[in-house]
Amino acid sequence: MKALSAALQSLLATRQFIVIDLYTITLADGAVLRYSGGDADVLDGGVRYPCGGWTGPYWGLVGDNAQCHWKLGTDVQTLTVSVLPGTALVEGSPFVQAVETGVFDGAWLEYRRAYLPLATSVQFWPLPATGSVRKFYGRIGDISPAGGSVVTFCVNSIADILQQPWPPAVYQPGCLNVLGDAACGINLTQWLVTGTVAAGSTALVIAASLTQAAGWFDQGDIAFTSGVLSGQSRSIRAWADGTLTLMTPFPHVPGIGDAFQLHPGCDGTMDAGGCPKFSNLANFRGHPFVPPPSTAN
């Protein structure tokens, strides 16, 4: 049973109220996005949920409202909701491009239903909600762009975590640690490198005058601290011949002289691109000498 405030119980008892869906997305980098599924901004519990307005995105299309699926037991519950992106931006990228480049990967979504008095005046902006009820909370799974005009989010309940393989630590050749985590023990701040964009750069390939050897930044990351891409980051595929080739392109071409920060990457091996690169063999958690199944007895 969901707990309701006395004010919300009184409103529901009148059987005359307005219902607006509210969505909160917490991205993997900690950024929080809030949206109102109605035609107006909503203020709920002191938090503002903007509507699509002139730019979008427009959540919960008419005739295709959010659909929840509940069942008893430990099976995964799901929420499906469609979005019309419009011209909205997410972390500086167009909405559809943000989906395609993985901005929503690993994000969590909370779906609430807000209730407002039927006599709520348009003089109030944002519209104050009497209260809201959480209808669903889970992690964003599949995202299906339908023809590029409508994006459909499929959200899985927290029970989805129970579907992951167990135990999490398995025998594998590569290291189980993530560079910079507690088990790895590397302080990435000490390995930070700064630089600026050189001529000839594109959205996918960044030219820079750096002294590090080829391969040093492979599987690392770049984050801009100035210019049109300030605050945005990408993973690095390769570093060689004075250029950083990225895993996915930035939404814009950086300007010459724009500043950025780099972290080197780790390939999770005992080779030069792995733990020896950071003098960290003591924390290596891979099993490169486990024989293949065809030879193990």
Image: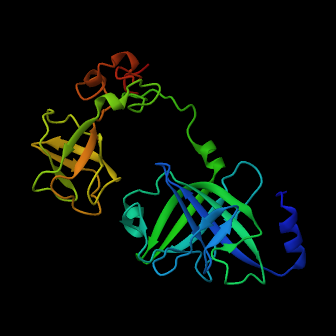
Q: Quadrant of residue 175?
A: top left
Q: Residue at x 83, y 82 (%)?
A: 16
Q: Quadrant of residue 188?
A: top left
Given the current orientation, which residue lies at the most extreme front position? Answer: 123
Q: Quadrant of residue 179?
A: top left
Query: Does residue 147 lie above or below 179 as drawn?
Result: below
Nearer to us in this view, 82 or 7? 7
Is residue 17 toward the left or the right of residue 141 in the image?
Answer: right
Query: Does residue 85 lie above or below 169 as drawn?
Result: below
Query: Does residue 145 lie above or below 225 as drawn?
Result: below
How far across and how far down the image is residue 103, in percent? 42, 57
Q: Residue at x 59, y 61 (%)?
A: 24
Q: Quadrant of the C terminus?
A: top left
Is residue 185 toward the left or the right of residue 221 in the image?
Answer: right
Q: Residue at x 14, y 38 (%)?
A: 210
Nearer to us in this view, 243 or 74? 243
Q: Residue at x 18, y 53 (%)?
A: 205
Is residue 31 toward the left or the right of residue 205 in the image?
Answer: right
How far across and how far down the image is residue 55, in percent? 45, 78
Nearer to us in this view, 244 or 50? 50
Is residue 138 toward the left or the right of residue 31 in the image?
Answer: right
Number of marks in the rendered image: 0
How far across and how far down the image is residue 97, in percent? 37, 66
Image coloring type: rainbow
How far across and how far down the image is residue 50, in percent? 56, 71
Q: Quadrant of the N terminus?
A: bottom right
